[in-house]
Image (cartoon, helix red, strand yellow):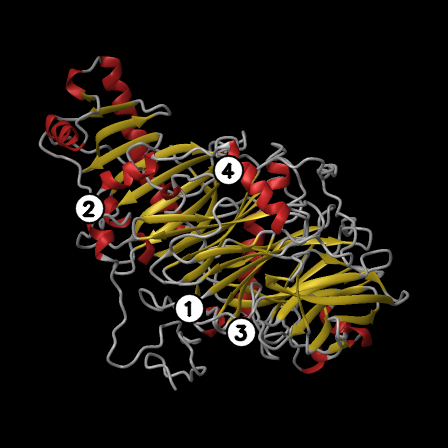
Amino acid sequence: MYCRYCGSKLKPGAKFCTSCGRKVESSEKTEETGVKAAIATAQTDTAAAAGAEAEATTAEGADKKQAERKEAEPKKTEQKKAEQPEPSASTPPEEKKTEGGKAKKGLLLIPLFLLLAGLGVALGIRIGSGFGSGGSTKQNDPFAKRDTQESGKATTAESGESGADSESAESGSEDKKREEKLVLAAENTELGTLQRKIAELNNTAAAAQRIDLSAVNHAVGTRNPGESWNSDVFYTLEGYENRPGYVNKNLCRLEQKQLINAATGNRIDYVIYINPNDGVANKIVAIEYLVSGSLQVTEYYYDANRMPRFVYQYDIDNYVAGYAVPEKPGQRFLFGSDTLLTWREVRDGGFKWNCAANATEAERLRKSWPANTIFLYQNESADMRRAFDERESIMLNAAYNTYETVMNAQNLTSISGYAYDEQGNGIGAAAVRLYRNEDGKLLYESQTDADGKYQIYVPSEARQYMLQIAKQPYQACEIYGIGVESDQLVAYQTPVYLFERGGATIDYRLKLGDALHYNESRSGMQTVIASAINLREGINNRTGTIVATAKADASGEADVQLKPGVYTVELIASGYETVYDTLVARQNGETEREFFAAPTVGSGQVSIVLTWGAVPADLDSHLFTQRGTETSHVWFGSKEDSFGNDLDVDDTSSYGPETVTIKQFSAEDYYKYCVFDFTNGVRENTQSYELSNSGATVQVYTDQGLAATYHVPTNRPGVVWEIFEIRNGRITPIQRYYDYVSSQGWWMHS
């Protein structure tokens, strides 16, 4: 069976093509490209009413939740040992706190549409068919078991282990090969161009690309007394109307960039929605990280002529994506012909204020929002008119400066992580070498800082890399298959540990558990008998030389002797997805490890598995879903939704797993997945480092195997990890991390 779009051979029974990402359909069927009629015809008033409703949780509901957990949660097996030594940080991690009595979690029905407009970085891992292929290839298709930073299985060339590189590091030949000095290839070659591009990005990235929002580069237009606001771009993008020339934002091509505010020095993340028909960015969202820890979000909407039509600005703790529904606090600026037609402000508590530039616009507002207070510019005081005029110029120029600067800024991705010694201390001045994965050619050299951190910028384009981190007298360690896609902002790597050569072998016991099903006593997960257990040196090394194997006994346990070092463990079991995970073998460290395998994922389903270390005790999974104008939230307070999504396993006593299943995946739906540190969040200890140093890993499986793997960013305070979204059938990493949650209490209570 072959794909009728690209001609690639298909896996028997496949639902999607692993080369182009399109649905496998019979020849008489056509691919749907439009949004549902319900989305196009839904009314704004309906969304506003839905968003205003929120139901508080009762203490009785919280008690019920607590009782359910005590009865249903698995008790951790005795194989679980004390956590590994925690890496030191420039800011020391929080002290470990005993659990004592755990606070109750309440149930909460929140205004989910405030969460679910959903923005993200367009990694472009495609799950289903969507609006065009977006340049999708097998390398960025989650249904192909490939080797990227996020996931998959590689060919020998992809792993960078061809020729002499395929020899084991134990022989020393691989280390010798990797330690070569950078030699620039000819400038007119692909290799030479890439080497110079990466060097340029890293030479300029320290200063960072900057944006001057306040520069007066555009004059305000002439006001037309008969002009009223045109809502085409806003309502079409947000899915409530279907106007010619615009598309629902879920069908837009996403880009992400990062700039520095020239006036404040604050970092601004930009998420850009590009119309696939004309290449115009119809929406740009600016997320500015304020010194206070909160965010200022500005959402700019542009028409087909790149002229500003609507600007919405508000402050928030976490960017959980929404849009300017009528009751949502913030300031709105409605533009037409480069003039401000309406300045509207909504505050907490329901206060609303509107000032219209002319009588025509004022009449439109009265018809749309008869209960609102509306002021007419010409009837206001001189001070009020002056404030209106000043705000008009400020916001108009901010909108134009944003479009012009952001769209011309370089697309780059940072690859970052930490290097530690055996005791978890940061290793400074270690060599960090970036290689091209397909041939092992050295592209760039850098060093870790005093804390052991490294960061290398690369072009945001589909490519595979490999890293080597080395410093005498330690044995070098490699990270294989680091996948970068177009418009990906960050690629966090799991920490690297460097060990001195030699050392006594360590007896290690491995075990495989079912990530979905409890055992009969509900004291843990069902045991899975692995048919093969292979270990390779390095991180994410899925195709290199196997340096050790282990055989599971009748109880599912397997013993293996390992020299101190970092290994990739591969566990294979019939009826389960193959597990790849990192194991750090060290003296006086853990000597037992349980891994968890997801049962083979059925057609049209997605399985999300969260695991972590001993601390903190309780991490929570949150899955938000939007289908048309309907929304849902799967979490510990509501483990099932009407869309067929389930929180199958909710672990509260360290390690995991927590497993969420999307049972009826649709490329037309929008999904967002987050992890919350309940242990520290419920205590309002939002500056805790425990989540960041927990080794938390999220793996996403489809019916074609492992689609994506995400590692928590290391050595950062915070309790909310916003990980990925699925929009238009594409898994896209978000990778935002928050330490400020004071106004968004749904993570822990009503």
User: What's under tag 2, amino acid-wise?
Assistant: Asp
Residue 234, percent from left and from top:
25, 44
Counting from the top left corner in percent of width and height, residue 183 is at 65, 69
- In this view, the residue farthest toward the bottom is 1
* Pointer 3 or 2: first along the chain: 3
Q: Is residue 199 left or right of residue 429?
A: left
For label 4, the residue is 61
Q: Give whichever of 481, 465 is nearer the camera.
A: 481
Say if mark 3 contacts mark 2, CB within 8 Å.
Answer: no
Q: Residue at x 63, y 72 (%)?
A: 441
Look at the image and tell me in which quarter the N terminus lies.
Answer: bottom left
Q: Quadrant of residue 309?
A: top left
- Say if mark 2 contacts mark 4, CB within 8 Å: no
Dot in front, 2 or 4: 4
> Disc 2 marks which residue?
232
Report the Cα–Cα distance between label 3 and label 1.
Answer: 16 Å
Mark 2 is surrounded, within 10 Å at the Cα level, by few (under 14), some (14 to 19) or many (20 or more) other residues, namely some
Horizontal and vertical percent position of residue 129: 35, 68
Q: Residue at x 26, y 65 (%)?
A: 33
Q: Looking at the image, tell me whether mark 2 or mark 4 is earlier in sequence order.
A: 4
Gap between marks 1 and 4, in whole Å?
33 Å
Q: Nearer the viewer, mark 1 or mark 4?
A: 4
Q: Secondary structure at mark 2?
A: helix
Q: Nearer the viewer, residue 625 or 323?
A: 625
In the rendered structure, find residue 397 and report the number of the disc placed on it.
none
Res 505 seen here: yes
- The correct choice, above or below, for 205 with respect to 5 in the image is above
Give amino acid for label 1: Gly
- How far separated are the C-alphas under marks 3 and 2? 42 Å
- Disc sitting over residue 604 in the figure: 1
